[in-house]
Image: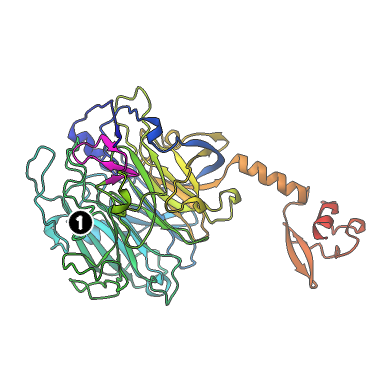
Amino acid sequence: MKKLSIINKSTFPYWICSVFFAVLAFASISSAQITKNLIPELVEKSKLSVGLEEVLKIPDSGSDKDENKAARLNLLIPPGDGSGRLFVNDMRGKLYVIVDRTAAVYMDVKSLVGKGFHDQSGQQGFSYFVFHPEFAKNGIFYTVTSENKDTGTPDFPVAQLIFNNKGERIASSHHDVIREWKPKNPSANTFSGTMREILRIEEPYPDHNTGQLAFNPNAKPGDADYGMLYIAVADGGSNGFPVSDTDPLDNGQDLGTPLGKMLRINPFGNNSANGKYGIPADNPFVDDGDPKTLGEIWAYGLRNPHRFSWDTGGEGKMLIVDTGQAFIEEVNLGKKGANYGWGEREGTWVVDENNENVLYELPKNDRDFNYTYPVAQYYHKIPIGVTEFYGIAIAGGFVYRGNAIPELLGQYIFADFGSDARFFHVPVDELVEGKQATIRELRLFDGKKERSFLEMVGKKRTDVRFGIDEAGELYVTSKQDGKVRKIVASPESRNYQNKVQSQVSTAVGTITRTLYDGRTAFRLSDGCTLSRCRAGNWATHALWICGRFQLVVEFISKKLR
């Protein structure tokens, strides 16, 4: 097999690495050279561009001991109740509600959980939350928090001995706890209600923890997938820095542990081992004949699938990103029963378990292993001359289905949240199993100036995350500055839209098609209706006059014929 290797390395103390354990492929890299014909093609800049418009800043939450005091924003989503509200979490413990571009504390999860709340590294704390599809009626939502091990008994304990990269036996790190919350009033902007624990997972290492929770937005009442809770769980972490074993407990391929998996449960059921949730009968490994296999598993072989989403249009594809070790960042199609290959594969390459800086080409009999490979991937491009830590890790986003940026429709938008910091897009229709889609870099505008997101946040890494509202418009947040920004049309896009609009409207403003007296008519932006211009001799009719404005209707007449 051909070998793929990194040839330039620099090392860092473990305490520095712990700061950067954030779901990254921990490559002790200063610059890298990879044989060009063995990697995905280089990502070129796109003709597409978007703007980033600041919405608000969440209050700083760090203490004097924190180098960065900004709120560690991780997810922004709507409750799905038609209220127009948005919710965003600070991993240090608070959940905020945003109404009319103003944020207020909805609940202090840290205080409600108690003294066991654990946020000792960049990947721990109040990491994710999700609203039940019927939140408007039942008010139920779910959270993931990191907690001390003395706060409860894990439903999924680590069954193996744990060692660090020096071969020394160590204790496990913490527990990840999923809870169900039920407010007294779902429409209230301050939480008051009850909670219950659903499940608890023991984490062997500080990084690569439980990731996003989500419900399939395309599932309807009566569908088998309706109300089923998906849980992304990473492989349990790295054994130190530098890494001596890429998947130290071999969790990725072990169907007896939830680590390195996508889980799917029924939070309203009770046939689980702890009786607090249900295991859906249509999960792929429920009846595999091995008593050690967990029925909760929906897919496996994942390193750190911390973000996933569904396209709410088109074919409704589920997209799972997976952060790589030292070479490859992945976009995967969500597929029931899939084995995505970790820790035997990274992207479309064979892993050397004892050397993170080496990959090999796939063997000739690779089909025998039945791995599911990414549908898009990009490699770790380290700029020449960089001598300090340069983290690269994918941040999953959403397929754009909003209305504000027509040229973005159907594009899967995602980014790199490390020092790479680029935003990307790829047409969702090109994300097809067995093929590699071409990724393009999405250009960003800050006002009228094209800038990188790294420049906007003014830090060495972005820690960007994506959010979405009920209209399908997208947002970005950053743990580096605690700001919420909305993805809007760029100046380039506005120019395009203005040109199209000017073909229809000059001085009057926007004209929209409507009906009048059973016939097609147009309404002006100020509410006047072109009621006197009916079918027939449009060009010879006078236009209804709104204030002091007049409009020539020759173009409209042609369009109606």
Q: On the rendered structure, is 399 left or right of 393? A: right
Task: Tell me where residue 89 appears, x and y as whole percent.
Answer: 35, 54
Q: Is residue 58 above or below residue 47?
A: below
Residue that sits furthest to the front in the current view: 364
Hey, what amino acid is under mark 1?
A: Asp
Q: On the rendered structure, is 184 left or right of 510? A: left
Between 454 and 8, the one nearer to me in the picture: 8
Q: On the rendered structure, is 492 left or right of 75? A: right
Q: Give the labeled residue for mark 1.
A: 254
Q: Is residue 247 above or below residue 370?
A: above
Counting the numbered discs, the total is: 1
Residue that sits furthest to the top in the current view: 385
User: Any magenta on residue 358?
Assistant: yes
**Residue 288 shows up from this direction:** yes
Between 370 and 184, the one nearer to me in the picture: 370
Task: Tell me where residue 63 appears, x and y as whole percent.
Answer: 26, 42
Q: Secondary structure at mark 1?
A: loop
Residue that sits furthest to the bottom in the current view: 222
Task: Tell me where residue 65 appears, x and y as whole percent.
Answer: 23, 38
Between 230 and 529, the one nearer to me in the picture: 230
Q: Residues within 10 Å of mark 1 (few under 14, many from 20)?
A: some
Q: Quadrant of the C terminus?
A: bottom right
Q: Quadrant of residue 389?
A: top left
Q: Quadrant of the N terminus?
A: top left
Task: Tell me where residue 480 appears, x and y as whole percent.
Answer: 36, 40
**Residue 393 shows up from this direction:** no
Which residue corresponds to the image point at 62% horizontal and 43% vertical from the top-left? 493
Q: Which range is magenta?
A: 345-362
Q: Is residue 446 above or below residue 414?
A: above
